[in-house]
Image (cartoon, grey):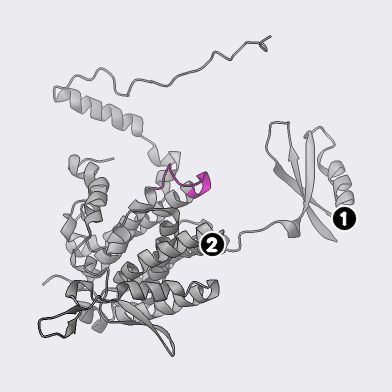
């Protein structure tokens, strides 16, 4: 019997996520079994099944492990930056520089005009 | 007399650093978002590989790896000219990416047998990422080679433009003989070049791109000029490289074009990439990040 992967969406805005798998002879039966197995308690608003054999797997998953230190790609690679900034500011101040702000001014435009407004008539 | 192993390490490290920097110039402007990410990520891999080689060179020279990577003058860099060229268009980018990563693969496979253990040991992890770079390059080579017509034409132009200088990746190192004799470089560059030619010729045959080798060779043919004695003579600046089809496949003949990088001679394009790459480091000596 073929294996079918089951995908569901919690709300209409959510992306599809894999929730499990069922064994079934065809798509109709797979859908029926998936509904009973995974969506009896209001777990989602939408679901689908796909034959495992139709999913293209990456053939060489060992390529996913990095060869060198890539911690700079992660937030944890930058711990202690606040301390570092304060130390640098203190050093600058001790050297006679006047530090009035240690980070650039926030120049982003926050567009809130659309909020709390009904459809235009 | 400096340790010839430094030349080998700097050739590899500088290749990786500079191609990595060129790849990173697609960040934000690649044809689509996923390839923007792919080239940015491959760029980070390549710079990471450069760090591995600079680390070993650091042990031999006593210099800080950052100083080796970013603190030298342009004529002290040992990268091949191919990697310093601007990205031009997508066809050239894919062509160079393919030619460079196949060449790097040939080099790493050979160095896995190096008698100098630290180099042999480093190749395993680096090849894991290089295999992905090859997969990425070959997937794009194959995709563009299968058209549409415009894509195939641009890929062909890119390959022809990059091919001659790609041979420069195999320019012998200054003390090549010593490195080979000591087993540090188990295979001389002339033999590596032949292995690489066999590898890419097989890919080109499969994709009907043999003309790249023919045109690459034609373009590299010297222009003959009459001398005062009436004999025809090839001007030195235009001599070789080329490749010719012989019984057993494509073989290199004559000199290299794209040569000079391993001796610190670079094209006009290197100044720009060097400025860009080293500017921050040189502007803030001794800064920590």
Q: CA distance from mark 1 to mark 2?
A: 34 Å
Along the line of sight, which residue is nearer the eye, A107 or B232? Answer: B232
The quarter holding residue A88 reads top left
Chain letter of disc 1? A
Query: Where is residue A75 shown, x and y percent of the image?
Result: 44, 38
Left or right of A79 in this view: A8: right
Left or right of B180 in this view: B125: right
Along the line of sight, which residue is nearer the eye, A80 or B141? Answer: B141
Kindly state the secondary structure of the residue where label 1 is placed.
loop
Kindly state the secondary structure of the residue where label 2 is placed.
helix
The residue located at (89%, 50%) in the rendering is A29
The residue located at (21%, 54%) in the rendering is B64
Magenta stretch containing residue A73, yes or no? Answer: no
How many residues crowd mark 2 within 10 Å: few (<14), some (14–19), many (20+)?
Answer: some
Q: Is residue B108 visible?
A: yes
The quarter holding residue B101 reads bottom left
Question: In which quadrant is the C terminus of chain A drawn?
Answer: top right
Judge whether A2 appears above or below B118 on screen: above
**What residue would you read off at disc 2?**
B139
The residue located at (28%, 81%) in the rendering is B183
Query: Where is residue B132 shown, x and y percent of the image?
Result: 49, 61
Magenta residues (range): B26-35
Judge whether B118 appears above or below A44 on screen: below
Q: Is residue B188 visible?
A: no
Labels 1 and 2 in the same subunit: no
**What residue would you read off at disc 1?**
A26
Judge whether A41 appears above or below B64 on screen: above
The residue located at (33%, 52%) in the rendering is B21
- Most common secondary structure along the magenta stretch: loop
Left or right of B247 in this view: A55: right
């Amino acid at each position: 019997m073929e294996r079918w992967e089951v995908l569901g969406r919690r709300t209409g805005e959510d992306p599809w996520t894999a929730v499990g798998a069922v064994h079934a002879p065809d798509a109709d039966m797979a859908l029926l079994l998936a509904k009973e197995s995974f969506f009896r308690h209001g777990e989602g608003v939408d679901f689908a099944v796909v034959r495992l054999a139709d999913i293209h797997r990456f053939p060489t998953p060992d390529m996913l492990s990095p060869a060198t230190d890539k911690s700079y790609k992660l937030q944890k690679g930058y711990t202690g930056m606040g301390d570092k900034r304060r130390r640098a500011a203190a050093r600058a101040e001790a050297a006679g520089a006047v530090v009035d702000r240690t980070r650039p001014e926030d120049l982003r435009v926050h567009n809130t005009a659309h909020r709390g407004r009904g459809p235009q008539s | 007399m400096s340790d010839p192993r430094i030349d080998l390490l700097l050739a590899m490290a500088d290749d990786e650093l500079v191609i990595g920097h060129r790849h990173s110039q697609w960040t934000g402007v690649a044809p689509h978002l996923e390839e923007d990410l792919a080239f940015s990520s491959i760029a980070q891999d390549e710079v990471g590989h450069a760090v591995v080689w600079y680390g070993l060179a650091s042990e031999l020279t006593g210099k800080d790896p950052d100083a080796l990577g970013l603190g030298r003058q342009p004529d002290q860099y040992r990268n091949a000219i191919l990697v310093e060229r601007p990205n031009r268009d997508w066809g050239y980018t894919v062509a160079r990416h393919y030619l460079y990563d196949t060449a790097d693969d040939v080099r790493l496979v050979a160095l896995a047998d190096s008698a100098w253990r630290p180099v042999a040991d480093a190749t395993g992890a680096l090849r894991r990422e290089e295999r992905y770079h090859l997969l990425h390059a070959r997937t794009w080579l194959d995709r563009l080679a299968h058209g549409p017509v415009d894509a195939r034409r641009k890929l062909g132009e890119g390959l022809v433009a990059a091919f001659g200088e790609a041979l420069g990746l195999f320019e012998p190192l200054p003390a090549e003989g010593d490195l080979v004799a000591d087993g540090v470089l188990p295979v001389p560059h002339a033999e590596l070049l032949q292995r690489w030619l066999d590898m890419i010729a097989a890919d080109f045959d499969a994709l009907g791109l043999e003309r790249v080798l023919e045109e690459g060779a034609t373009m590299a043919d010297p222009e003959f000029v009459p001398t005062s004695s009436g004999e025809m003579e090839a001007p030195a600046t235009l001599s070789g490289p080329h490749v010719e089809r012989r019984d057993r496949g494509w073989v290199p003949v004559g000199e290299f074009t794209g040569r000079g990088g391993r001796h610190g001679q670079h094209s006009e394009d290197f100044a720009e990439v060097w400025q860009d790459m080293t500017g921050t480091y040189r502007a803030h000596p001794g800064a920590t990040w």
